[in-house]
Image (spheres, rainbow, N blue to C red):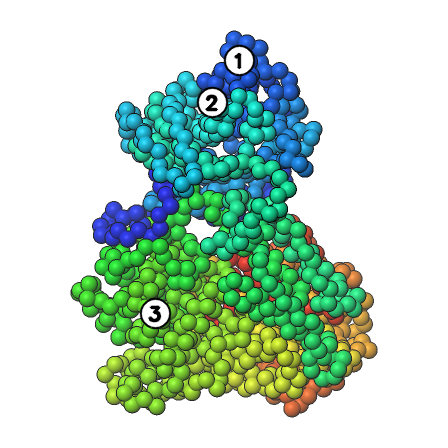
Amino acid sequence: MATKSSTMARTIHLSRFSSRPARHFSNASIFHSSTSDSPSAASVSSSFLSKFTSLGPQTRTQILDANQLQLLSLTLDRPTLYADSPHLSNAAPPPAGTPLPPGYHLVYFTPAFLEGELGADGTDRSYNPQSPFTRRMWAGGEVRWPRKDGGVLNPLRVGQEVRETTKVLSAEPKVVRKTGEEMVVVGVEKTFENEDGVAVVDRRNWVFRKALPTDGPKHNPPQPCIGISPPQSPPEPSSPTAKMHARSLKQTPVTLFRFSALTFNGHKIHYSLPWAREVEGHKSIVVHGPLNLISILDFWRDVRSEGQDGKLDESSLVPESISYRATSPLYADEEYRIFLEEDGKNGKVQIYSPTGDVAMKAEIKAFQFCRGDIGACTYVGRGPKGRGAHPQTNPAHIQNRLHHLENLVLSFAQQKRLEGQDVMTPPAPQLSMPQEFSAGLNGVQYTGANTALSVESPDEKKELGDSPGRLLVEDVGTSYLDAAHWRAILEEINDVKDYIKEEDEESEESVAEPDFAEPEGPVLLLGFNNPMSLEDLIDYMPPKRLVDRLVSRSLNSRYPSIIMIHQPTFRKEYEKFWLDPHAVSVNWLALLYTIMALAVAIFHRSNEPLPELLRGNRDALNLYKKCAARCLVLSNYTKPGRYKVEALMLYSSAELLTDGDPHYSVCYILGITTKLAMRMGYHRDSKHFPKISAFEGEIRRRVWSFICQLDSLTSNQVGLPKTVQHWQFDTEVPHNLLDEDFDEDSPELPPSRSENEYTPALYTICKGRLMSVFGDISDLAHSRESASYDKVLELDKRLEEAFATIPPPLRIRTFGESITDSAELIMRRHTLVFVWNKARVVLHRKYLTKDRSNPRYSYSRWTCLNSSKEILRRQADIYNEVQPSGQLYETRWFIGSLQVHDFILAAMIICLELVRDDAPRTETASSDQGFALTLKEKEDLLRTLEMSQDSFKLCIPWSKDARKAYEAVSVMLKRAKKGQPRNRTVNGTFSMTPSSNGSSAAGVSSTPSISGGVPLPRDVPCRPESINIPPQSSLPSVMPTHESEIDWTQQLSADSIGVLENMLDTPSNIDWGLWDDQMQGIEREHMNYMWDDPASGFH
């Protein structure tokens, strides 16, 4: 097996954000002069994991050879295996049945490949990711020796037939801290079983860095070996009772060669001095990582055996586990020292190189026999980070099992609804968790009983009512879960998954994230380990020509949050900053850094080349976000101050644009920002305060409008009530003015421009009206009290009235009518239509399958179908126009912000209607009261689903998110087609409402009726639209025909498919809460950039 190279080892220390200023940017590690077209670590990790997940575990069988064991012991300069064992030099090999000492399994199951199948560096490539990440190093891992009942050891023995099972646990992109170099970290588990069961579980972390050119410059200048003695004095023990032991070792080139031969390891850094020096940049050949691991275990065995005169049995000389990580390389012919700190039965090990660097760390846990002394047992509570004090492990297999269990719960809950059972009545099942995780789950849960809520009748109360929820009482506080009982169980599963993920991440400290690497959450909330001064933050600012590019990209992007920036004023402040950077306030510097972060995020999303000096978009993005967060922390952002609210909102925008599932964290930041804004009076209109200038008052209106919109958006995403309620503020909507219409010297504002004149502010005004109603609809959907149907119709009326106020410049038009309009304006028009239709679906969806014989709810069913059809139609239009040469190609990065969840929801609405009754219908309506579809109309709905599938398929080559959405829609389409007549001929127009001479602003009928049903209530304003389905021939030639569809569903897990199919099998019993939970799970795990709300993405 391969070990680590020096560059890797020198760059994976555990320090955090360095406070040392990067004053000379030409040499700073965050910049370079060119970019590479090679695949990213993230994409390589994803494809690698997908490959080995489909392959499954790999097995080999081998008889443990005595000769191999003898040669290893001699290579280690150990003439005997154990204290009472015979001498192995010039003697017969160990007899059959001899137990292998701990760690000696590493010389078995060696790689078996032809030389031509090896990599350029001599390593086997069986578990290598794709190029360029092929340079492998052994970073660390964990080995366990399981015991049977009673503590009986099951050792591997000479002559046994042993089966090795290898499976890939994880593949993650990482970044080297100091150099910014990308890498892929692969987690592998090897299980060794004999006739008595599992004997050894060996988990390894391999680091794969980019391959080095063999004819290029040296990666590191080689340094001569110097005879530096390692530290002679041991490190200070961690406790007064600990004992320190030390051993000196020197591995010769002969030793390394013999160990390479025994392990059939062709890695050249262990035996080829020219390769190690001239290619890899090492000063000499490198000691194997597995060799160091065996040396540690041998030292521990020897210490345990001292003074025992053979009284210890073989089980006592085998630990329960050892976890280790390599931190820097060791070289041949250099003396190094191993220090073992023994405290009771356990041990901590550190290997020091001759230079005094720690080369490897390990923790050994000895097996403890239970004496049955209950009084001596001690309960170990949660540690300082909220988890039990237990050895670190790599529990990816538990993650997989929990994911499977999560989907089983979803399926079970759906099936229970079929049986007419209350899924909230049975007690939550007790999950049997491994002992090492049990200490972290000591919260107290309260699960409420099912409570009937009022809608229209007592029966409807039980049907549509929600649970009062779940109250989690923990040592960190209480949390309320507004969900049904089964969703509370899912939340518990998510808690365990997050808990295990934390443990998994901490076990890989040897591959530390750089300070500017992608954080696990907003650094503004997570905090920093070491402070930085304003001077340091100014010194991190790159050259002006680069900042100019970034600021220009942000301010010209027309991202919704940019409306808060009065550009002429900012331009003056920006020029003043460069005249004297050190005179800037930390608040304004935070604003500048958030603008820069937003720009890099836009470059990243649009796949545009970055400015020349940027080293990498992801690294620079996280660096600038961290700098902005440090500025805000340094300014104490909880106290009022100029620019703070704007900087916090721009920071939230950067998080929305960066993260795949940012809404929870953004919701928290937004809550803080909202309270700060209220403390500063943003919620009161400036007309009440004469001391506030006209200029400042108008900017505050823009900021407050954006706060309210983002509040409604994120609250809906996380399923919580919005923070800002209508009665809390009286701030007026912004005026329809250009930035050039007023400035800080304006004594009063000029008259607002007509809404027939488009300005960036007009979009904010119109979207604010829609989002205000959408926020109320979201609150109703997540309310613990169910509202009457009259309340639903009241909100529907308000929504229609808000939509009717959209002025002509922002009303939707065909692409043919928009040939003279900018791509930005076209996208903003579509945004407003998406928000309107999404709000309608969320408002009415729970009535989609309710009491279909009652015409009272026909309007809701009809509204859901029309809005869903409109959403999918617009989806097809946009996906077609973001292709090269399309009208929206220059704004193609907005496609990443399209709400894929909304598209799938719309597809689900249509699919539910189609699968409600698979029996073919005639051209006349069915006997359903109120509203039914003819056969032709059902065919048109199927065509709509096919168009959505085509749209996602069109984007598969460049978006894995589109692939996942394509798979989900394919499952729906397959189910919807079940039972439909074959050889369908689809043409013409789908219209659930006859044409009407009256039309609204949206160009839709104002007094509809449903074919074959009853007229809709005339007191409810509605604007359904006849949606024309273009024939297949009019679609782009790159869109595939359905006769040649590729089966992509293999990319969607069987569990997820099962949950989706269960819902489609029982459309009348669908639980929209379970649906939202399932979609959020897909969003967290798969939809990295396409799951943002349209209100945040379309401009």
Question: In terms of sequence position, does the residue under pointer 3 or pointer 1 come before the other?
Answer: 1
Horizontal side of residue 445 vs 672, given as left or right = right
What amino acid is labelled 3 in the image?
Tyr
**Is residue 887 visible in this depiction of the protein?**
no
Q: Residues within 10 Å of mark 3 (few under 14, many from 20)?
A: many
Q: Which residue is mark 3?
A: 637
- Give percent across and percent down for residue 42: 47, 48
Q: Which residue is mark 1?
A: 88
Where residue 558 is drawn, which disc sits there? none
Residue toward you, 525 or 353: 353
Which image quadrant for residue 521? bottom left
- Give percent across and percent down for residue 2: 46, 30
Picture residue at 33% right of the left edge, 52% below the top? 17
Horizontal side of residue 964 vs 357, given as left or right = right
Question: In terms of sequence position, does the residue under pointer 2 or pointer 1 come before the other?
Answer: 1
Query: In this rendering, which labeled residue sits more in front, label 3 or label 1?
Result: 1
| Inter-mark Cα distance, 2 to 1 | 20 Å
Picture residue at 46% right of the left edge, 54% below the top? 384
Q: Which residue is mark 2?
A: 260
Please determine whether, in this image, residue 274 is positioned above or below residue 771. above
Question: In terms of sequence position, does the residue under pointer 3 or pointer 2 come before the other?
Answer: 2
User: Dot 2 lies on which element?
Assistant: helix
Q: Looking at the image, which residue sits at the far left? A: 579
What amino acid is labelled 1 in the image?
Leu
Disc 2 and disc 1 in contact, CB within 8 angstroms: no
Residue toward you, 528 or 792: 528
Query: In this rendering, which labeled residue sits more in front, label 2 or label 1?
Result: 1
What amino acid is labelled 2 in the image?
Ser
Picture residue at 44% right of the left edge, 72% below the top? 671
Disc 3 and disc 1 in contact, CB within 8 angstroms: no
